[in-house]
Amino acid sequence: MIGETLRRPSLARRLVLLALGWSLSALIVTAVLLALLFQQAALRRFDLSLSDLIDNLTAGATVDQGQVFAPALTDERALRAYSGRYWEIAQRGPDQKMHAVSRSRSLWDSELHPPADLLRRMAANPGQPVTFKARGPLNEPLRAMARQTSITGLAMPVIFLAAEDRSPIDRDVRAFVAWTAGAFLLLGAGLIAAVIFQVRVGLRPLFVLRREIADVRRGKAERISGEFPIELTPLAEELNALMTHNQEVVERQRTHVGNLAHALKTPISVMIAEAGQRPGPLAEVVSRQAEIMRQHVDHHLRRARAAARTQGQGERTDVSEVLDELARTLERIFADKGVRIDWDAEEDLFFLGERQDLMEIAGNAMENAGKWCKGRVRVRAEGLAPDRLMLTVEDDGSGLAPDERETVVRRGERLDENAPGSGLGLSIIDELARAYRGALKLEDSSLGGLKLAIDLPRAA
């Protein structure tokens, strides 16, 4: 059930997912860009320090007898062994490789190891600094910079290199990424909550409209009367117009059925009366067939009215009031038999339909039980679900065999021809229950007789 619900299209879920998709994508892209910008800014500051060191080396370098000498620098880190800040002066040898001619004390007995393509890169950008990665004397990651410069008195250009341990920058970048990720995660969580809240608030008028329509269907209201945004007001008005139109159609159909029934009843009554005044075989046939016709008319009239009511706007009928009235009436009718009717109904139990229909359903059931009981009838009304109720009527009579139960529900069928009645009582109950999308079941009663279980719609 949950999986089926999740697979069904949802306007709220669609809006939330779209908003979250764009918001989270924007957050992720922004976070990545911020991390890259921070890293680039840190590297620019780092490269600026390396460029300053190379400038100092270039400005202070001297040439004596074709030999390059480094200036006396005051950079304390370059004077301390393996401090992480290094420099080196090199020249290109006959083998087209760089050979160090001077280096900082911090390198001690080590050298910087530039990549093999460094000479080619510097030749492609003469006079411009070239950055590269290297490993330091302690295998620490270095960011290095090299610049090829021509010095007066030397035929071959001189290469100045400066390098520094980049571990602090990497730590700073990682810390920035971690803090940024945490902040954006919190921001993302806030955005998710805000989007869900916004969608719920934005769609609240739709939920209100749904409740209004449900109230109309359950009989708690006749029309949609709430205040809605301008986008939903036309929909509410159209729904009200549709319900009004449907009600008018139902009323017209009920009127037509009633007119037809009344138009047929008069000729049938005349036929029965005329046949009664002229005894004979023909009169008996006419009377019998006319009575069948009248039963058909009553049956279809009742069924059409019930069906029309179920299609119209909902009405609420208090079940306990109907059962109390029927019980008092039927106890007086069966007073000579000493019938006692015990009834019970849950509090605030309402039938979703007209009072006349519930009177006919419960009245026929209780009358049938009073007719066949020995002296006791028990009636119980209880809720089965928020939209369904069960009415049970039991008696302490002789009951019915299972193969006889289907027969007695048919129209006009009677197992005992000597008993009073037309044999339509259970048929009426069954037809009205079906018209209300319910059902009638015949079962054995714990009192010893027959139990009628009638499933009917329940009003909120």
Image: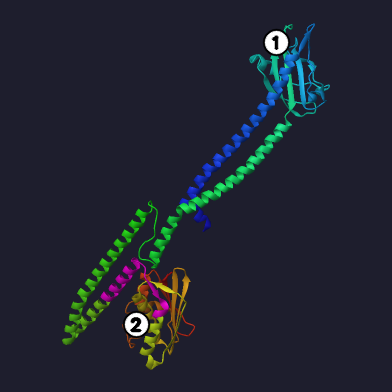
Which quadrant of the view contains residue 299? bottom left
Report the residue at 31% width, 68% height from top. Answer: 308
Which quadrant of the view contains residue 262? bottom left
Q: Which mark is residue 150?
A: 1
Residue 301 visible here: yes
Amino acid under disc 2: Arg
Report the residue at 50% width, 45% height from top. Answer: 19
Identify the secondary structure beneath mark 2. Answer: loop
Mark 2, residues whose alpha carbon is within 10 Å: few (<14), some, or many (≥20)? some
Q: Residue farthest to the front?
A: 74
The verdict on residue 314 being magenta is: yes
Report the residue at 16% width, 83% height from top. Answer: 274
Q: Is residue 103 above or below residue 67?
A: below
Task: Judge left or right: residue 189 versus residue 458.
Answer: right
x and y, in percent, of residue 404 in the image: 40, 80
Most foreground residue, 152 or 438:
152
x and y, in percent, of residue 162 in the image: 73, 21
Most foreground residue, 430 or 13:
13
The residue singled out by tag 2 in the image is: 414
Q: Quadrant of the C terminus?
A: bottom left
Q: Is residue 427 above or below residue 226?
A: below
Name the magenta segment's main secondary structure. helix
Q: Is residue 231 above or below residue 436?
A: above
Most foreground residue, 455 or 381:
381
* Sooner in the amino-acid sequence: mark 1 or mark 2: 1
For the record, the magenta segment spans 296-322
